Every structure is written in structure tokens, then in C-alpha cells.
Image: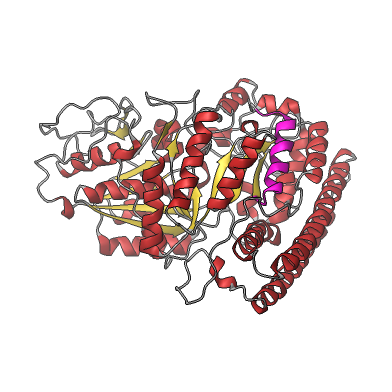
Amino acid sequence: MIEDITIGRATARKKPGEFELTLDPRVTDPSSFKVSFLILLDGDLVMSPEHLGVAYMTSVLRGAGFTAEIREVEHGAASHAAVVDHLRAYQPDLLCFTLMSLNLTSCISLCQQLREAFPDTPIACGGPAGTFAGLDVLRNNPYADIVAVGEGEPTILDLVQRLYLKESLAECPGVCYRDAEGGVRQNPARPLIHDLEALPFPARDQLSQHGDKLEYVRVSTSRGCVANCTFCSAPHLKNRVQAGKAWRGRGPEQIVDEVAQIVERHQFRTFDFVDSTFEDPDGGRVGKKRAGAIAQGILDRGLDIYYNVCMRAENWHDTPEDHALLDLLTASGLEKVNVGIESGTAEELLLWEKRATVEDNVTIIRMLREHGIYLAMGFLPFHPYATVDSLIANAQFLRDNSGHNLRRMTERLEIYPGTSIVRRMEGDGLLAETYRENLDPYGYEFADERVGKLAWHFAQLYNNQDYHQHGVITDQSAVFEFETYNVVLQTFISRLQRRFGSLAGVDEVMDGFKNTVHDLRQEMGQFNYTFFMSNLESVMNDVLDTDKQARQVVEVEEYFRDRLDRLRSEQLRVGKRLSRLGARVSEISSTLPPVLPGGLPRNYTGEGSGATW
């Protein structure tokens, strides 16, 4: 519990949204105050554990002279016990969590152990769940003392100084907290940071902890979003809890400087630009000019990198200008794009308040294929308002448009606080008590019971109870393994063709490999569709039984395992054939290879590397 002691605080008044890395003169020994940021690795099917918000806050604290560490905590009791043992040696003055709906249960469990081990150490939570449900977090997690609301950098700097000085939190904007009597209070939110370039570059502890060998490093070129998807808890036009512009961006020069620094210091070159939409602020002339300037800056600096971005379908059109920009982006290293397709029906796109049409979605899928860019597709077929007809239409859409990832066909909506779809569900009586109690992301009912039955059935096919009930991935099935491997495979194809396409014989080998992969993916798309429709018909006819389900678990695992083995074997053969042609396959890894004499320069034709599906 935070001691409610007030000490006078002499601070200069700043303009709303202004951020300065300054220290109260009464904080005479900041390095003696230790902060531990604990990263709970629950629920993410991603190939990099890096948490950028924590990295920024760590950098801010260190810039002010405080001691801060970042520590990953894997799912499970053993990992929780190990981190408690580490913290006994570290002796933190503040413990911090980034909180999402998927890790709330794990957070409460670890917080209980931490409270027993460190009875007088404040425990703070932030992140999306804290921002939109701060008071609920405090009520549901009796071991937490503070919840931060909104952007963390100014709040953590202010909070740590107040704790160091043993000041009251009553005047600390942007937090919920327990007072000396145990009451729960919420202070007004801080305004959004208006100049992102005032922030220091984020700390790269997690990259270093993994020996500079993560699959990618995250970079934020902007914050906010000008869209307003009903299921999304990222800050956008309709869900802001902080005053200020919905979208703020950094300049291309500073972005390229950050990328160059990571390449130089870590010899690392694969990046994930985590902006809600890379072509914002308007998705048109202004935003695309900015995106083009970033790409051109990468090329001008001679940075041999690869990167991923998020895009919105309605922003891209089959025009010479948009194709030229995609050529420039791929030339600078773009290899993967995440697009929130979400649905293959006009009705559901309206439900999600997507600005894209079904035709827009088909167009961007085709354009990305033509430029050899991997599509990471967001898709939401199962949700409280889904119907049998919408499920069939979505399955057909996926079959015809990149349906080789089975999980896209069977995905369940995760619901988050602060979203308008949750408010609608509450009004329609579809929210379950589990959501109200612990922000359960699957805490809702289905309007059509048959849809709900089918959703739960599919959830049980891929994993154990952790995934079925909580969305937490533990023992990875072949379906999940294929999903992550498929990204690696696609980047293997695009990187080799971009880098070594000028070598005699390479295009022929790669074209044959792409055809093989394309044919296998098409076959998998048809398998997934047939599998999906068979289960749907069983539910409609009320003949779905546990014995069939048990057989299907084995059948799906065997099918995906066989296709994984076939693709990996063919990839290995292609790698050997390319090596004999003089292509050094090691040069396309995320970590920069050592400089060797006689190496080939990176080569781009400006025409993309062709369709691979």
C-alpha cells in the first residue's frame, strides 16, 4: 500500500503534452531507486517477445539516472518462482507489469507471490487493460497498488520520483491507486505526448538478452490511429482517454537514425514497424509521402534491412502511383504486411466499422501477392453476432484468398475494455460474468448457440485447456507451428530472390520452389475449407461427438506435421541448390553476417518478386 505522505514539490509548469526528461532537484541519488519491469509472455503467438512500451519507459528512467531492468517471465509456476528468486537479489523499489486481458490471470498469480516476498514494495500495472479498466484492475487484483492510464513515459518518470520522495499520489496525473485507507482512487489522465521525437530511443534489453537473435525488433514511427474499429483497444478517434491528437508521427530522419543505430550496435536487421497504420495520418497523399520518405531514407543510408508494417486495405488502389510506392517499399526491405481484413462479408465489415469494402480487401491481397509481400491477415469469423451464413461466406472467402492458415478460418474474437463492441454486447445481454470478473477475452455468449458450439469445438482442436479457455499458447500444435513457419518460409523466398536474383540460375530455382509452395498452400486451403464445412454440417445436424473430435485432433496434427516436413525438406534442397550457384543463404538472416570479401551487393529489380501463393 502506498503511504499517504505529502512533501512539497517544486516543478516548472509545462505546456499540455510537453515532455522533458528532467529530474526534481530533491532526488539526489536516483540510481539507488530500482524498478523492475516484468514481461509476462502469455497469449502471444508472435516471433518476438519485445515490449516497446516498457523499452521506452526503461530508457526514460535510465536517462534520469534511475536503475531499471526488463525481465521476461514465461507462462507457468516454475518461471514465476524463478523470477521471485531473482528479485530477492535485485531488491526492487517498484515492480511493474504491462497488462493485457490475456495475461491478467497470470499477473494476479505472480503478484500474490510478489506481495508475500516484498510486502512493502509497490506493484504497478499499465498497458491496455490498465488504461481502459484501471479501477477494475485494482478491484480484481488485491495485490496491485497502482494502475497507470495511457502513455507511460511521463507517468513512470513522475511516479518514480514521488515514490522516491515518499509523496502522496493524489497529485500524480494518469494513475489509479490505493490510498492510505485502502480506498481506490483515480486521478485525471495526462494529455498525450505531442512531440514523439522528445522521447529517447527505447532500451533494447530484450534484444541483448536473446543474444541479438530475435526474429525481429519493434520500431514505433507513430502513435494513434485515425480509424475506429469497434473491436480495437489501440488509441483511435473514438476511444481516447487522453486529450490530444489521435495520431502523432515521428520524422523520417529520426526513424532511420534509430534503425541505423540498432544495425550498428546489434548487427541486427529485421524490424517490425508497429504503427497502427503505416500510411497514416490520412492513408493518402500525406501519409504515403511520409512512408516513401522513410523507405528512401533507408536506401540512401545503405541500410541492408528487412521490415514489416501494418496497412489498411482501403488505402491501396490498383494505380501506377500505388504500385510504384510498393516497389519503393519492397526495395527498401518491406517483406510482410499485416492487414485487418477481418471479414469477407459486407455486413460484418459494417459491424466492425471498417472503412474497407470486400472489394478493397481482395485488391490489397492481390497487390501484395504481385509484389511478393507476405500478407499477415487479421480475420474474425467467430463472434457473438456471427451466423451460419456468415461463417460459410467467410470460409469461402478464405479458401479463395489465402486460406492455408487454418486458424484464420476458426478464429474467435477477443474482447477488450474500452471497445465499442463490448458496450454493444453489454446492451444486448451477451457479456458473461467472466468478463466482468477478470476481463476474460472470451467472456461472451453467442446469439446463435450453434455458432458458439462450433467456436468452442474448434478451439479445442489445436491445444490444451490453456488455449481452449484462456487463449494462452503452451504446448504448440502443428497448426500454430505452421503459422509461424509460413512467415519464415515466405521471407526465405522473398529475401533470396531480392538478394541473389541477378545470379544465373537463381530465378529458375526460385520460380520452381514458389510454384511448389503455391500448390501446397492451395491444397491446404482446400483441406481447411473441407474440414471446416464438415464440422459445420455436423453441428447443424447435431451429430458432433467427442470420439470424432478426438480423431480430428490427431488427423489435423498429422496433416499439418506432414506438410511442415515436406516444406522444410524442399526448403533445404533449394538452399543447397542455391549455394552451388554461388548464393550465400546465410546472408539473409536477421542478424548481419560477417563481412566477407567478394560478396554480392543487394540487388532489386524494382518490379517485385512475383506472386508466391
Residue at the image position 58 percent from the left and 35 percent from the top: 415
Q: Check the image and report above or below for 142 versus 347.
A: below
Residue at the image position 61 percent from the left and 29 percent from the top: 431
Q: Check the image and report above or below for 418 versus 478.
A: above
Residue 120 seen in this snapshot: no
| Front residue of 463 and 204 | 204
x then y, percent, for residue 306: 53, 56
Residue at the image position 51 percent from the left and 33 percent from the top: 287
Q: Check the image and report above or below for 18 versus 571.
A: above
Residue at the image position 41 percent from the left and 48 percent from the top: 256
| Quadrant of res 244 | top left
x then y, percent, for residue 285: 54, 29
Q: Residue furthest bottom?
A: 580
Residue 320 seen in this snapshot: yes
Q: Is residue 451 left or right of residue 315?
A: right
x then y, percent, for residue 494: 64, 58
Q: Quadrant of the N terminus?
A: top left
Residue 477 on the magenta segment: no
| Quadrant of res 25 | top left
What is the span of residues highlighted in magenta in the rendered image? Answer: 356-373
| Quadrant of res 540 | top right
